[in-house]
Image (tube, grey):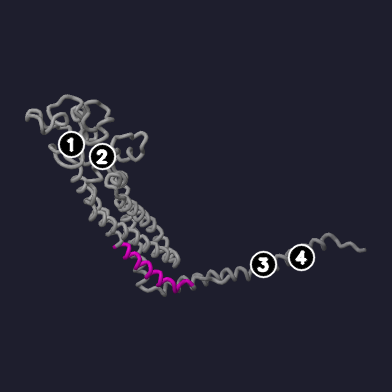
Amino acid sequence: MQILPSEVLDELTQTLANATMHIEGMSRQPLKRQRSNRSARSTTSSARRRQHEDGCVTCLRGTLHCYNVFILIVGCAALGIGIWLLVTDFGARKVTPIVGNQLYEVTTYLLIAGGGAVALLAFCGCCGTIREDKCVLSFYGTTLAIVLIVLGAACGLAFFFRSELATKIQGRMRDTLSINYGFEVRTNAENKRITDAWDAMQRQLQCCGVVGNVTSFDSWMYYTSKTKWSGVKKGQNQRVPESCCAPGDFKVCTGEQEFNGPPRFFQGHRDELRQTNPFLYTTGCYDALIDYLQTYSAVVGAVAAIVPLFLVFGIVISFCLCSRVSGYSHDDEVDL
């Protein structure tokens, strides 16, 4: 067998390697051409879509962007008002055990839920507007409609609560103060809840007792004559709880220190024993409570009524833009 010289073998090897590289290069060219064609078609599709857009779509997109920023601020404001009404010293949770009606508390929770949802949806709306995604825009508009219903319900409950406010509230106040206030608060959770609510109300509204003025047996004198609290009070000479006191001398206010006036002396005593106590709230809480609830239920109702007006605007814009961009969905598809 004849053996080829090494120079011939090297030449054949080099020729084979060159042929292999040439074949691989030819096989890659169709793939590069395919990718180039795909990119060109995508660019052409996007350009064609932009050319087809009319001024209406551009206007809707810009309007929805501005709307989302505005509605984010409105949603955060509604959320903040709801949280403040809930956590303030005499908030919605403290009102319920006194008035025996949960409408005010439920309305506050609905306002918080609606405000939070509006703020969250504003971000979703921005994403849908930028991407011009039909599904995102549809979801955005539908959810806004649901939030509109929730806030509408909150508005209705707030004004219904306001109209039914005075019904049986004074009787409920008398019952809770007589039976529950300050009695077995360590073992009875309901009594503890009512006691805390009364204390918060009297500090916030600067009142004491149920109704009436300094000469009434149903204002500050109610504690001594008609409550279980008088039998379990802390001090023997204490006539009223500390929540009935203005900042200052609590012993003079509660009657533990001698003072010629309330709460140690009142209307049946001589004139010199009826001096004004500067540290004691002597007006009953009923009238102040009614004014307080009417004011804040009106605030909740107004917020819950105004926000949906903006939501209607957003719902209309989002669905209009959704209908305008739906015709461009097939232009963005590129064949693989």
Q: Position of residue 194 (x, y in %)?
A: 30, 40
Where does label 3 land, which residue?
A: 25
Residue range highlighted in magenta: 309-329
Q: Secondary structure at mark 2?
A: helix
Give the spatial CA distance, label 4 vs label 1.
108 Å
Residue corresponding to mark 2: 177
Residues packed near mark 2 inside 10 Å, few (<14), some (14 to 19) or many (20 plus): many
Is residue 177 shown in magenta?
A: no
Query: What's the distance in space between the residues labelled 4 and 2, CA to CA?
Result: 105 Å
| Nearer to the camera, 52 or 299 | 299
Q: Secondary structure at mark 1?
A: loop
> Pointers 4 and 3 in contact (CB under 8 A)?
no
Q: Residue at x 18, y 42 (%)?
A: 211
Residue 314 lies in quadrant? bottom left
Q: Earlier in the sequence, mark 4 or mark 3?
A: 4
Q: Which mark is residue 16?
A: 4
- The three-letter amino acid code for the residue at tag 3 is Gly
Q: Nearer the viewer, mark 3 or mark 1?
A: 1
Front position in the image: 21 or 179: 179
Q: Secondary structure at mark 4?
A: helix
Of the image marks 4 and 1, the number of the one nearer the N terminus: 4
Residue shown at the point (10%, 28%) measured from the top left: 273
Vertical relation: 6 (above or below) 176: below
The Cα–Cα distance between marks 2 and 1, rounded to whole angstroms, is 16 Å
| Amino acid at dot 4 | Leu
